Image (tube, helix red, strand yellow):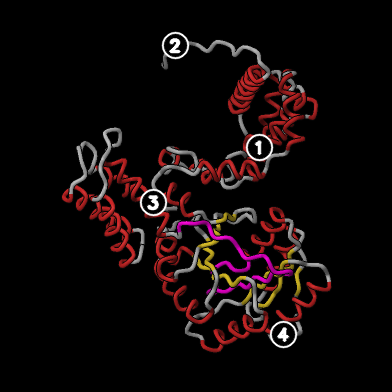
Amino acid sequence: MFDNLTERLERSFKILKGEGQITEINVAETLKDVRKALLDADVNYKVAKTFTDTVKEKALGQNVLNAVKPSQLMVKIVHDELASLMGGETAELNLDDKPSVILMSGLQGSGKTTFSGKLANLLKTKKNRKPLLVACDVYRPAAIEQLKVLAEQIGVPVYSDSDNKNPVSIAKDAIEYAKANGQDLIIIDTAGRLAVDEMMMKEIEAIKKAINPSETLFVVDSMTGQDAVNTAREFNQRLDFDGVVLTKLDGDTRGGAALSIRTVVTKPIKYVGTGEKLEALDQFHPSRMADRILGMGDIVSLVERAQEQYDEAEAKRLEKKIRKNQFDFNDFLSQIAQIKKMGNIKDLASMIPGVGKAIKDIDLDDDAFKSIEAIIYSMTAEERSNPQILNGSRRQRIAKGSGTNIQEVNRLLKQFDQTRKMMKMVSGANRGGKMPKMPTKMPKLK
C-alpha cells in the first residue's frame, strides 16, 4: 500500500535538498511533483490541488531554522497536512447504547461480510463485548453460510431466518433476540447494492429507519480507487452514514481513496482491513498513516500489536528458562506463533522506520516460517527439549522428514544457538550483571 506514492514523494523532497532556504520557486517545483504523485495515486484532482495550495501557503510563511533543512521542514508540513486530509483525529465507534447496533452498507463485493466478522472479533477481544452477527443479506447465495463460518471461527452467535425474505423484519427480530439473550453488540450484515438501484437503496434506508443504529458504516473496497469516493458520496446522500471502512488496503492499491474520501464525504475513516485473516483489522489513525506514506514507518502500531499478543505469565516462564539457558525449540515455536498472530510479516516489517523501502521488492509472505516449522516438527520431543543432542545422523533424519536439506537444518541450529546466547546475555545484563564485551572490529567479509 502507498509504495509508489512514498517513492514519488521522496523524490519530490530531494528538489529542496542542498537549498539554503524555502523560496516560491523551489516550493513551486517541489509541489508540482507532489501534486503529480498524488494524482498518480488516484487522489481526487480537487483534493490534490487544495492540498498542495495549503502546503505552499504554509511553507512560504515559515522561517527555516539553522538546525532544520528546508527539505525536512517541507516533510513536516506535508505530514501534518496529510494527517489533516485524512481526518486529523482518530475516530471512535459510538458504542454507548446497550445494545449497540452497527449497520453495514456498501457495494457488492466490498467485503462487508468479512469485515462484520473481523469487527465482531476485535470488539469481543478488545472491548469485552458480546456480539451478535445478523444475516440480512437474503439475496446472495451462501451469504448466510459465509457469515456462519466466520462466526464459528471467532465463537460468536449468528441470528438468521432462512424463511424470512424481509431484511427489515429480520433486523428488528434480531435486536429483540439480542436483548433476550444478553448480547450487547449487534452487527447487521446487509446485501451489497448499487447506488443507482432505487429499490435496494430504499430497502437499506428502511432498515436504518426501523432499527435506528448506533453506527452506520460504509464499507468500501480501496482497490476501486476514485470510484470508491464517488460511490461513498452517493451512499452518504441517502444514508448519512457515520464512518467509512476501507478494505483490501494490503492489495495492489494506489491509496487514493484513503486520501480523498474524508474530504469528499466529510465522514471519518474508522477502520482499515489489512489482510484476509480475521485479526487483520486496524483502527484508522490519520497521523500514523501519514508516517507510513512518508516512509517513516509506524512503530506505535507495531508496539500495540505486540502488546496485544503479550502474555505476562508466558513471559515470566520464558525469562526463567532463558536465565538457566534452557530456551528450547518448543519455546521457539511458541514465539513464532505469537509473531504470526500479529499479522502479515511484510506489513509488520514495513512499520519499522526505514525498512519499508528496503523490503519493497522482497517477497515476504505468511509462509516465511514454514520451512523452520517443518524442521522443528520433524524433531522428536526429546530433541526439541535438548537441541544439544542433535548429532549428524539425527540432522540427516530431520532434513528428510521436513523436506529440506542438511544445510538448512544446520543453518537453523546455528541461528538458534546464536539467539539463545544473545538472550542469555541480555537477561544477564537486565539482572545487573556486566554485559560481555562486544568485538571492537567487525570481521572482514570474504
Looking at the image, residue 438 sits to the left or right of residue 43; the answer is right
Give percent across and percent down for residue 429.
Answer: 63, 17
Which residue is under mark 1? 336
**Residue stretch rendered in magenta on the structure:** 88-114
Amino acid at the residue labelled 4:
Ser
In the rendered structure, find residue 326 and report the number of the disc placed on it: none
Q: Is 93 within the magenta?
A: yes
Residue, x 63% and y 34% (percent of image)? 372
Q: Earlier in the sequence, mark 1 or mark 3?
A: 3
Give percent across and percent down for residue 46.
Answer: 31, 67
Q: Count the marks: how many?
A: 4
Label 2: state its secondary structure: loop
How far apart are labels 2 and 3 at the CA level? Answer: 43 Å
- Give the image quarter of residue 358: top left
Which residue is under mark 3? 80
Residue closest to the eye, 388 or 306: 306
Residue, x 63% and y 76% (percent of image)? 190
Which residue is under mark 2? 441
Q: Quarter holding the C terminus?
A: top left
Which residue is under mark 4? 169
Q: Is 7 within the magenta?
A: no
How far apart are labels 1 and 2 at the CA level? Answer: 32 Å
